[in-house]
Image (spheres, helix red, strand yellow):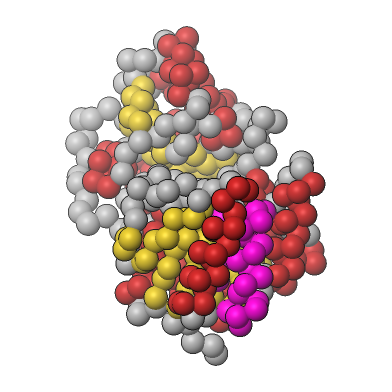
Amino acid sequence: MPVVRSVVYLTYHFPPEVGGIQTRISKYIDRLSKRGIRVKVLVAGRIPIVQGMALGAEVVPCPGGMRRLPVSVKLVTRSVIDSRADVVHVFTGSSTLLGVYALAIAKLTGAKPVISLFGREDFEFAGVVPRTLFRFSTVLADSIDVNSAATGSLLPKELRPKVHVLLGAAEEPSKRTSQDVNSPPMLLFVGRLVARKGVDDLLRAFAMVRSRIPNARLSIVGDGPEMRDLVRLAEQLDLLDGVEFKGTLIGPKLDQEYERCNVFVLPSKDVASDPANEGLGLALIEASMHAKPLVGTSHGGIPEIVKEGENGLLVPPGDPDALAGAIVTVLTNPDEARAMGASALRGAMSRFSWDRATDVLLESYTQ
């Protein structure tokens, strides 16, 4: 089996930006560096706030745009050669000229070329240019790492022999807090506020939940282009006294939201205005690490985490009535909810640790 000593990443998404992709790459870097594997990260398209050494990796900014492409090409070439890279992993950007070039230089230098895909938006394009560039990337790549079997199933059949499924992971919280039995029931959503996340359906469902459980509360963690419309919808539904829009939270403040909720909800769906889908849903894994019952939609990779009747409940996407019914079922059956939460934690501990996720990542590099 080949030994991996040095990895070069190319990515257009990187901390301090917040998101599932950014979390995944930062955790991989941390775990790989702790195993003695050198990591260099080429952050394309912008100048990252975190420069130099970060997260156990050397970070190199690559300027964006066609005009600066020759500069970025030189940086990629020098980084791959100087690092004596065993793997060149295009984490995001497989439909870009720079991504294709990084895979080509990997081939030329004997490094293993790898790409990651996180959902339909990464490989279904209206334009000829990105579609052609992506096709070049899939030909050059020895491994196509996807975040769920659902994402892999969307790829053409001829590409599937290259596919490795790398489910996400989450950290176990450093401490847990006991819930106050007198606190009002709390629902939690965590994610980017875009239409495909289905927060509009959640608000409509929550209005129905409140008709059954008047003291219920909803915490919405995240930010995005739908924020203003969602606040307006909450106002129209007369929910502002029961809904908290928290904005983006990380670290202990986010852990606190998970700890105080009674059920975590991810109501993702397809929308015509957004080609993306829910490739997996890392927030579901984070909630599981806090032993919370889950309610999700049968969309994308969500059913690969939410097991009906075991760790949560699944409902059809885009159906606020069914969503409300599932939430009420969880909130009004505390013994079953605790059992689901315990099952969620057991599953997360066995399937979704970052150490286990890094093992699977390395398998995609060496097989």
Q: Residue at x 63, y 41 (%)?
A: 276
| Up/down of 269 relative to 108, above or below | above
Q: Position of residue 107 (x, y in %)?
A: 65, 77
In this view, the residue in front, 130 or 36, is 130
Using the image as rendered, state which of residue 288 and residue 4 is in the foreground: 4
> Farthest bottom residue?
1
Q: Position of residue 338 (x, y in %)?
A: 34, 47
Q: Quadrant of the C terminus?
A: bottom right
Specify the segment rendered in magenta: 88-111
Q: Position of residue 129 (x, y in %)?
A: 76, 48
Left or right of 122 on screen, residue 331: left
Tell whether position 105 is magenta. yes
Residue drawn at 70 percent across, 31 percent down: 272
Residue in the picture at 39% in, 75% down: 38
Camera-side residue: 307 or 161? 161
| x 46%, y 13%: residue | 232
Q: Does residue 287 appear anywhere in the picture? A: no
The picture quadrant where one finds residue 299 is top right
Tell me how many marks there are: 0
Quarter holding residue 190: top left
Task: Tell me if residue 11 is in the magenta stretch.
Answer: no
Task: Identify the image quadrant of the N terminus.
Answer: bottom right
Residue 242 visible in the current orientation:
yes
Percent coordinates x, y for residue 335 in the rendering:
35, 44
On the rendered structure, is 22 left or right of 267? left
Rendered view: 192 above or below 26: above
Q: Is residue 360 left or right of residue 165?
A: left
